Amino acid sequence: MNYELMYELALTLVPGVGDVNGKKLVAYCGGAEAVFREKKKTLAKIPGIGEKTVESIVAQDVFSRAEKELAFAEKNKIKILYYLNQDYPKRLQHCYDSPMIIYCKGDCNLNVDKVIGVVGTRNVTDYGKIMTERIVSELVEDDVLVVSGLAYGVDTYAHQAAVKNGLKTAAVLAHGLHTIYPHANRTLAKKMLEEGGCLLTEQISGVEPDRENFPKRNRIVAGMIDCLIVVESASKGGALITADVANNYDREIFAVPGRVGDSYSEGCNKLIKDNKANILLNVGDLRTVMRWDDNKKVVPKQMRLFRDFSDDEKSVMGLFEETDVVYLDTIIAETMLSPTKIASILLSLEFDGILTALPGKRYQKL
């Protein structure tokens, strides 16, 4: 048995802990196991950790359930992704309320270069079906990972289009992996797995698709992507909730416009009207905003080829040794420099043509 993982899983099951306080406990104590071994007095001094939560941690009543879940995961070939591990979605990792653990069925790489979310109404119209299929099919050359929620409507057509066009697709579920909801999509889910996609959830086995789980599911979709496409939405609905969360996470949002008066285009049209989303007439619009059409790295004429780096600049540039694109949150966390200092360094590196800013608080090495 993986005892380290058991402690990590058990911490998420402690009543009153939650994702934000769970990460705080890990940071203060030095690890999930250390949380359970810490003295009661010390736990009580951690900001935001109430007396009831401390009592629940000390009681350690969650380990039998944790062991049961580990056995279920092993039996069903489910990977458990802890938020500090490399295979955890790196984009989601930097969201303050991201789940500490994600259960993953399938072998999909969640950290590919381009990840898009496609969401919309369950009551999809023929127009919505056509636009969903067209958008996904046109993204084939970009080799994106398509993320959605496996719900009826736009979600279903997005996953189907991805499978049809040879793109990997991930479904974020609002329930445990003991079942598939809606049941009508069980065959689609199986096909997704066969084609290299995956099913994701933060819920342990046995948790049913209750109403309150869907908004929580939407934050995972919003956090693990580079941009979100809203195909069709009424004036209210889950797709707009996902768009709001994505906006809070500084993700780019795109909305497909619809005819004035069409009820299932009201949400998209309002997103565009309120400047909360880019208008998406075709995939070219997305590529331009996301700068995916800049396939060739053009070295600016003014670039200083033999520039000497300061020690702080070396700390920043060291993060680009294994990847060309790094999130601002990663730079802050890894370098331990102040945000003001980092802003100054990044601006200088941009001026010298060494880095360029990308949407979503990302930086790319030129």
Image (spheres, rainbow, N blue to C red):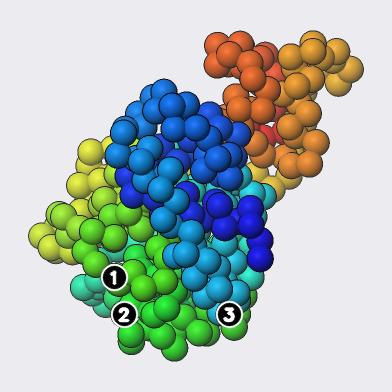
Marked residue nearer the N-terminal end (2 or 3)? 3
Q: Quadrant of residue 274?
A: top left
Q: Position of residue 82 (x, y in %)?
A: 57, 52
Q: Along the line of sight, which residue is nearer the eye, 115 or 206?
A: 206
Q: Position of residue 194 (x, y in %)?
A: 59, 83
Check disc 2 and give the amino acid type.
Pro
Can you identify the residue that label 3 sits on? Answer: 75
Whole-Å distance between the Cαs marked 2 and 1? 9 Å
Q: Quadrant of the C terminus?
A: top right
At label 3, the amino acid type is Lys
Residue drawn at (33%, 49%) of the image: 15
Q: Nearer the viewer, residue 257 or 199?
A: 199
Helix, strand or loop at disc 3?
A: helix
Secondary element at tag 1: loop
Badge 2 is on which residue?
A: 182
Q: Is residue 290 left or right of residue 232?
A: right
Q: Give coordinates of residue 248: x percent, y percent.
A: 36, 37
User: What residue is shown with label 1?
Assistant: 209
Tell me the element at label 2. loop
Q: Residue 54, image x and y in percent?
A: 38, 37
**Relative to 182, is 30 above or below?**
above
For the residues marked 2 and 3, what is the alpha-carbon distance in whole angstroms? 23 Å
| Circle nearer the N terminus (3, 1) | 3
- Name the outermost residue toward the right: 306
* Amino acid, disc 1: Pro
Can see residue 359?
no
